[in-house]
Image (spheres, helix red, strand yellow):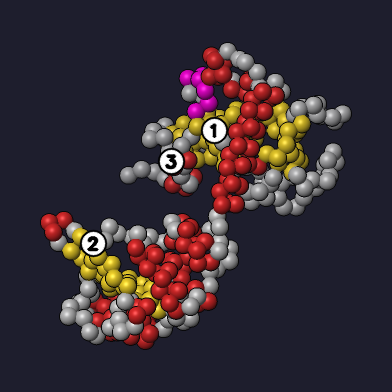
Amino acid sequence: MTAKPSRTTNRLHFTDLDPARFEDLCLGLIYTLRPWSDVRHYGRLGGDGGVDILATEPLENAAERTWFVQCRRYRRASRRELLRAVDDALEKAERAPDVLVVVIACDVSRAAHEAFTAHARSKGVGLPLVWSQSVLEATLYAERRDLLFSYFGVSMASDSRAREQTVRRNIELKRRIIAELTQAIDPEVLLIRPEKRFHSSRAIIHSIDDSSYPSVESRETGISSWFRLQFFDLYHNGVEFALGIEYALLDREDHWTVIPHGYEVPSDEFQKVKVWHTGCIPFRNIVEIDTIGDEYYSEPHLYCRFADGGEPYEEFRYRLCVDGRYPHRLDPELRRPLEEMSRPTA
């Protein structure tokens, strides 16, 4: 079982389940985990000899791997309790299993987990595993939503519908932007001046929480709740705007960094170039478009959620022109600190 980040904000209360019901949940998780040749659930009938679930996994060349599963609905799992779970599972076994899984209804400390692993291996267990509360919860949300609904009444259908609506809404917004803000343009022109696709060269960006327009805000921190930007281009997920022209230092391996205007190039191994600094506003952050404008600005007005760190942008880019063609984007993976770029090579 692979733990994935849980999407829930409220933790699932496994300890509220009846012990037999908790075992049934564990069986449900185990049942589809592997293509078992045999699965036996002894816990409900009692007399399980320390093993609640016994499963046999077929391997290549007619080999098999044995799994023992212990279901412990602990509210707290100490080191002692985990070691006891190992001893209980192996007490009546003729030999140690290839895999021992202890499923618990709470989280476990690293020290207790490490002690459990060491103790189980000292007893001959090939692979000791602990499935804690966080692992169970993440797996239910990510992979077994059927069990999530059956045991906790949590349905993800509304989340799925919301995602579908978001996709439809973003596609419709993209169509509106293309229809209302752009125009047909010669492809050769777009290779050099992508911003020419827009009817207007600029737009007014408003926060949906703004109440200061058309007054100019004075802020000590953060960006203004409305401002004017130059269109740059469309991108796969929204609209890219030009924030300004800056300078970058490039080396022969395409590493780069942003530098001040007056920076002196340290050697002929580098070149100083002008770059566009751009900001990308995704469709998800654009709430509405007013193409008419008003008496202050007759340009398009975009009303946005400032939902990414108090700003509307999901990312920033740096672009330079290559051979007079479309402004080439500098690879963010090749950006280096200025100190590293200007350091003399050996």
Residue most extreme to the front: 45
Q: Position of residue 60 (x, y in %)?
A: 16, 56
The answer to whether residue 63 is left or right of residue 241 is: left
The answer to whether residue 122 is left or right of residue 214 is: left
Crowding near the residue tagged with mark 3, few <14, some 14–19, many ≥20 C-alpha atoms within 10 Å: few
Q: Quadrant of residue 155?
A: bottom right
Q: Secondary structure at mark 1?
A: loop
Identified at 50% across, 32% down, the residue is 329
| Mark in front: 2 vs 3 | 2
Identified at 60% across, 52% down, the residue is 158
The residue at which mark 2 appears reads as 37
Q: Amino acid at mark 3?
A: Leu
Q: Secondary structure at mark 3?
A: helix
Q: Position of residue 69 (x, y in %)?
A: 32, 73
| Mark in front: 1 vs 3 | 1
Question: Does residue 343 show up magenta in the picture?
Answer: no
Q: Mark 2 touching mark 1, by CB under 8 A?
A: no
The residue at which mark 3 appears reads as 334
The residue at which mark 1 appears reads as 236
Q: Quadrant of residue 299?
A: top right
Main SS of residues in magenta = loop
Quadrant including the N terminus:
bottom left
Identified at 70% across, 50% down, the residue is 222
